[in-house]
Image (cartoon, rainbow, N blue to C red):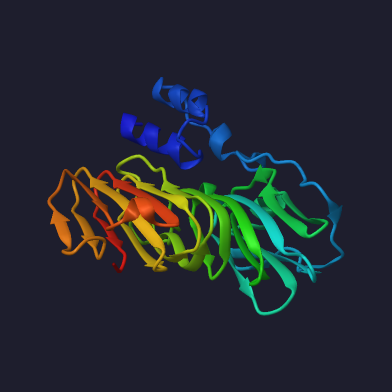
Amino acid sequence: MTNKRLTRRRFLVTNVGALMAGAFLRSSLSGQQPTNDPGAAYRSGRRSLFQLSPPPGKPLPTKTTDTGIRVSGDRAERMLTHIAEAPGLKRGELVLCAEYGRIEIMDSDDDQIRLQIRLESNAGKAIEDTQIRAHLTSDAEDFNVRVWHETQGFGRSVRPCDVGIRLQVPSFGSYKIDAIANHGCVGVHRLTLASCKLRGLVGIKVQQVKGYQGGHDLNNVIVSGDLDVATDAPQGFGNAWIHGTMRVVSSCKVTARTNEGSIRLSFSLEPETGIDVIGRSDEGKVLLIGIAEDPRTLKSGSEAHRRSEGFEGKRIQVAVHATSSRSDVTIVSPI
């Protein structure tokens, strides 16, 4: 096994490429006889990287359905659905984690919280070995949703069990979001964000397609607090991007960081808002549009800094810092 392959195996199962699965892999390099054991990192039912505790508050009355494990040929799946009423709840704290699978968080058109967890693999045993934890609680006018899996299952050919999470929450609330999806990234749609931290490594793996697909997506969100978004895969392991369209209504910091993926952020600002932008790319281009009188495009390996006129005197001040190691950075904000 080459050193490159060794590094890849370690990386693919960790949030920063540092899971100590190397003992088995190092032994593979030592010339020992091969075994059917894939190693601790890929052993079905191993402890997940994400270990959380239930959130505070009282459990919300919830209607729960579970399809059980359904197998058809080389496809196995299980669907868990939780539905809770949330009248009078004005704020939410949403903490969601998945090693493999994408997370989508979006608005609902009523007072309900709808949580859907889809587990998929090529063997029922992989789903059986993936233990899901989901909690919906309330405390006064606040509610909490916390989802993770305590164990990670693997099917045939060490194909992981994907845990896809889809959460709908009332559109009128204000939300604090902390979400990580190592292999899939996160989408947030049409919500007001009091704070938001998104982490991921690569996009979704599509069978027989080279590389990974997708990245973090912020779609028509309202930003009222700090936003911190990153794809942390080392170079050579995927180009997960960060794309966002947002309206800012309060002073905040917006930070976006990738290695190989592109960054494209578009801001809609009120007249009393000023914006200060730093864009940098070591190998890609930096394009800042609308932040000053003329758009500026810088060549690879450059940093651009623009500040809107009268920034210091504005009631709302937005500081944006977007950096990519290898891809383009584009920031758009009308003057």
**Where the N terminus falls, by quadrant?**
top left
Residue 83 in picture, x, y percent from top left:
77, 69
Residue farthest toward the bottom in the current orientation of the protein: 109
Q: Is residue 315 above or below residue 180?
A: below
Residue 206 in picture, x, y percent from top left:
43, 61
Q: Is residue 151 left or right of residue 17?
A: right
Judge by depth and name the residue closer to the eye, 79 or 92.
Answer: 92
Q: Is residue 258 left or right of residue 126?
A: left
Q: How many marks?
A: 0
Q: Is residue 34 above or below residue 271?
A: above
Residue 293 in picture, x, y percent from top left:
18, 64
Judge by depth and name the residue closer to the eye, 323 or 40.
Answer: 323
Residue 211 in sight from this viewpoint: no
For image coordinates 75% across by 41% down, the residue present is 53
Residue 243 in picture, x, y percent from top left:
38, 62
Residue 105 in sight from this viewpoint: yes
Judge by depth and name the residue closer to the eye, 50 or 145.
Answer: 145
Q: Is residue 113 above or below residue 49?
A: below
Indicate the quadrant where residue 73 lies: bottom right
For image coordinates 16% across by 58% down, the residue present is 296
